[in-house]
């Protein structure tokens, strides 16, 4: 469960404590639209009503392994809501993942995650080391050896974290049309898309499969994330690709010198029909196809 800054105000948290939170959290996404480039169709006035500034106070996210588990958890949550006072449900949305864990563009997602030191989980093949818990959990030691700033009083933040929830529409047809405008051959289009994501649709990284997709590699969690950008002298994975921008790994950096202090734990979910190469921009207006990213 996440509580927004407006939610804390609604709960009556004193002003001095509210001011102890980081400025971006105080301001909220809508007020930071310029920094986030949320303009034009992405501007706050076009967001779902539930995400209008000052509207959402509490966000409850429920994860389940299957539909039965989700139905049971939802039933419990709604029962609690029915017995509560002062709480109004302003919106719900059911998301999920495909069996292959594909995003709306047909690419395998949620492959690489940072490992938290002290969690008892060993780093994935390809992860250099675990990252200090304080980079994710308030009150724990960060990569500096000391905790990051915790809101006051400490009970408001200790053992908590900051959650970012963004819901967006994916223009799958426009993406397909762009690839088709650049390459006439379907395999060449597939490769261009891989260059933009950093992986083939199977999840196989370009660094390990530079010339063609390798489904066996993409399906193998012991290999599909076990690579270094030092092994990419030909720059098969472009610096501008989604994967390399999200985690530069051991790339030579000009601004940020320690990639371990800017990692996020991210879970992407989707809704709408599965990706198809036949979808065009004309279909984007007719299909409810989108994704969310919670980090």
Image (tube, rainbow, N blue to C red):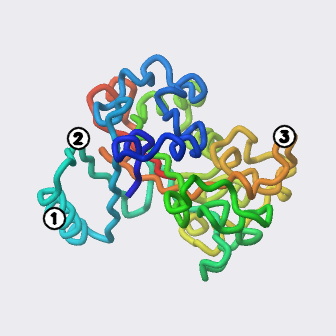
> Which one is in front, 15 or 135?
15
Mark 1 lies on a secondary structure that is helix
Q: Quadrant of residue 230?
A: bottom right
Residue under the image location 32 percent in, 71 percent down = 65
Height in image: 286 above or below 274?
Answer: above
Mark 3 lies on a secondary structure that is loop
CB contact under 8 Å: marks 1 and 3: no
Q: In front: mark 2 or mark 1? A: 2
Among the two numbered marks 1 and 3 on one chain, the one whose residue lies closer to the N terminus? 1
Q: Position of residue 118 (x, y in %)?
A: 65, 78
Left or right side of 283 for 141: right
Q: Quadrant of residue 129?
A: bottom right
The residue indicated by pointer 3 is 255
> Which one is in front, 286 or 16?
16
Among the two numbered marks 2 and 1 on one chain, the one whose residue lies closer to the N terminus? 1
> Which one is in front, 278 or 59?
59
The residue indicated by pointer 2 is 90
Left or right side of 76 for 193: right
Q: Position of residue 34 (x, y in %)?
A: 57, 22
Residue under the image location 56 percent in, 62 percent down = 111
> Which one is in front, 115 or 86?
86
Mark 2 lies on a secondary structure that is loop
The answer for how far apart the CA atoms under marks 2 and 3 are is 41 Å
Residue under the image location 87 percent in, 40 percent down = 254
The residue indicated by pointer 1 is 75
Crowdedness near tag 2: few (<14), some (14–19) or many (≥20) residues, C-alpha within 10 Å: few
Q: Position of residue 268 (x, y in %)?
A: 46, 52
């Amino acid at each position: 469960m996440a509580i927004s800054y407006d939610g804390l105000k609604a709960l009556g948290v004193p002003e001095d404590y509210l001011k102890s939170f980081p400025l971006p959290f105080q301001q909220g996404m809508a007020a930071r639209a310029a920094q986030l480039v949320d303009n034009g169709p992405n501007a706050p006035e076009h967001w779902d009503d539930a995400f209008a500034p000052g509207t959402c106070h509490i966000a409850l996210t429920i994860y389940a392994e299957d539909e039965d588990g989700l139905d049971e958890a939802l039933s419990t949550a709604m029962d609690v809501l029915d017995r509560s006072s002062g709480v109004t449900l302003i919106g719900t949305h059911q998301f999920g993942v495909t069996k292959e864990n594909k995003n709306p563009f047909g690419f395998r997602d949620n492959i690489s995650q940072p490992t938290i030191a002290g969690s008892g989980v060993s780093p994935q093949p390809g992860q250099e080391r675990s990252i200090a818990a304080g980079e994710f959990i308030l009150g724990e030691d960060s990569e500096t050896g000391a905790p990051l700033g915790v809101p006051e009083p400490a009970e408001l933040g200790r053992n908590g974290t900051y959650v970012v929830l963004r819901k967006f529409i994916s223009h799958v047809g426009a993406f397909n049309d762009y690839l088709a405008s650049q390459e006439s051959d379907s395999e060449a289009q597939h490769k261009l898309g891989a260059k933009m994501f950093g992986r083939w649709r199977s999840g196989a990284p370009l660094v390990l499969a530079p010339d063609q997709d390798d489904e066996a590699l993409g399906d193998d969690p012991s290999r599909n994330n076990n690579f270094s950008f030092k092994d990419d002298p030909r720059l098969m994975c472009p610096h501008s690709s989604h994967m390399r921008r999200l985690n530069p790994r051991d790339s030579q950096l000009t601004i940020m010198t320690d990639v371990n202090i800017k990692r996020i734990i991210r879970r992407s979910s989707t809704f709408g029909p599965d990706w198809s190469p036949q979808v065009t921009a004309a279909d984007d207006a007719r299909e409810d196809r989108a994704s969310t990213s919670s980090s």
